[in-house]
Image (spheres, grey):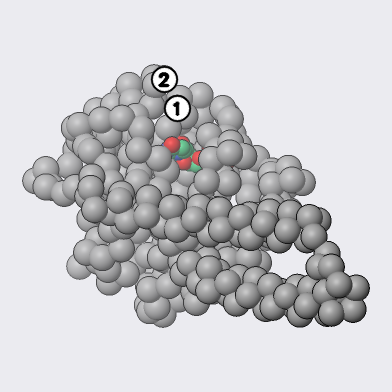
Amino acid sequence: MSKLLSVVVSVYNEEPGLREFYEETGKILKTLPKPWDYELLFINDGSADGSLAVLREFAATDPKVKIVNFSRNFGHEAAMIAGIDYAAGDGIVCMDADLQHPPECIPEILKKLEEGYQVINMVRTRNKTAGFLKNVTSSAFYRLINCLSDVKFEANASDFFAVGKEAAQVLRSSYREKVRFLRGYVQSIGFKRTTLEYEARPRFAGESKYSIRSLLKFSINTILCFSDLPLKLGIYSGVLVALFGLAVMIYTIYTWAKYGAPSGYATIVVLLSFMFAMLFIIVGIIGEYIAILFAELKDRPVYIVQDTENISGGKERD
Ligand code: UDP
Ligand code: MG
């Protein structure tokens, strides 16, 4: 019985490098050992350049190339989720279209899938491609999230990972949150899992779609989604401020008893601004959680598919 490997590739304005990606990945996929066959599932995430036309060209001559075309840009995470939804494989590999995730790793991943691993995380050994700032902030982020969340995150995990059939089914039926972090889910669903190392290559063509601002938003959302500790901050800081207030009260009574006049203006200003700052921060944090709840309540689709190519059955999914 033959087995199918689905390679899911999210594409957003990747026209300059797509041909190279297709050729290089195709070369590796054609040499997969028996009984493995493959499908190359491209998710076009609302590219504004000629990416879709290039993909259609591949699909016209190669039935193994499948396309899911979004109605607009929904983001990398949504594209990977759609890829997992539409993949028909016994194993699914998610990778970027910019050749930063070396396709040579696929046979190694396949071996792990055959050994029965359901989750295979690819870990960057060294990220020569990212700047110093990105490396430092990324490691600080992982330290923080590991401190705050019950789920332990692999620090150098990337969007390069593979899941088996059972893990994919879990991701299809659950974890459909609107504000999400797929990499975190993959690491928290359990199953038999392993990590493999790879060396990230520089981007083949085009430029990175993530700005520092979008990374920051992403990091904040991840912390909020995987930890409710910030919500409890109100209680902790309330206790802290109460203790502080008590100390100031004792001090005031003491100075009043000793000098006959309580120390005045400065204390009030310091206390007031300190407490208001605390209050606003906490209100802000609660606001962020409400925003997530609101997104969940509205229940808008994670992605909208405009059309597909070489995919039979036209799945009805959100
Ligand atoms: N991508 C996407 N939708 C987006 C942004 C990016 O599908 O809104 C894809 C992009 O085409 C690439 C992958 O996600 O295949 C990773 O993006 P990028 O290389 O820009 O991120 P980096 O490697 O710099 O983290
Ligand atoms: Mg990249």
Q: What is the spatial separation of the Cα atoms under label 2 and label 1, in whole angstroms?
A: 6 Å
Q: Residue shown at 80%/60% (left/top)?
A: 264
Say which residue label 1 marks: 13
Q: Is 141 or 37 nearer to us in this picture?
A: 141
Query: In this view of the protein, which residue sits in the foreground, 279 or 206?
Result: 279
Callout 2 touching callout 1 (CB < 8 Å): yes
Residue at 25% in and 61% down: 172
| Residue 24 % position (x, y) | 49, 40
Q: Amino acid at mark 2?
A: Asp
Q: Which residue is mark 2?
A: 49
- Position of 312 compared to 4: left or right? left
Front-most of residues 224 and 278: 278
Disc 2 on helix, strand or loop?
A: loop
The image quarter containing residue 124 is bottom right
- Of helix, strand and loop, which one carries label 1? loop
Q: Does label 2 or label 1 sit earlier along the sequence? A: 1
* Count of numbered tags: 2
- What residue lies at 53% left-to-right and 34% top-to-bottom? 209
Looking at the rendered structure, the kind of residue marked 1 is: Asn
Q: Quadrant of residue 65?
A: top left
| Mark 1 C-beta closer than 8 Å to ligand 1 | yes
Is residue 79 placed above or below 270 in the rendered structure? Answer: above
Q: Where residue 12 sits: x, y (%)?
A: 42, 32
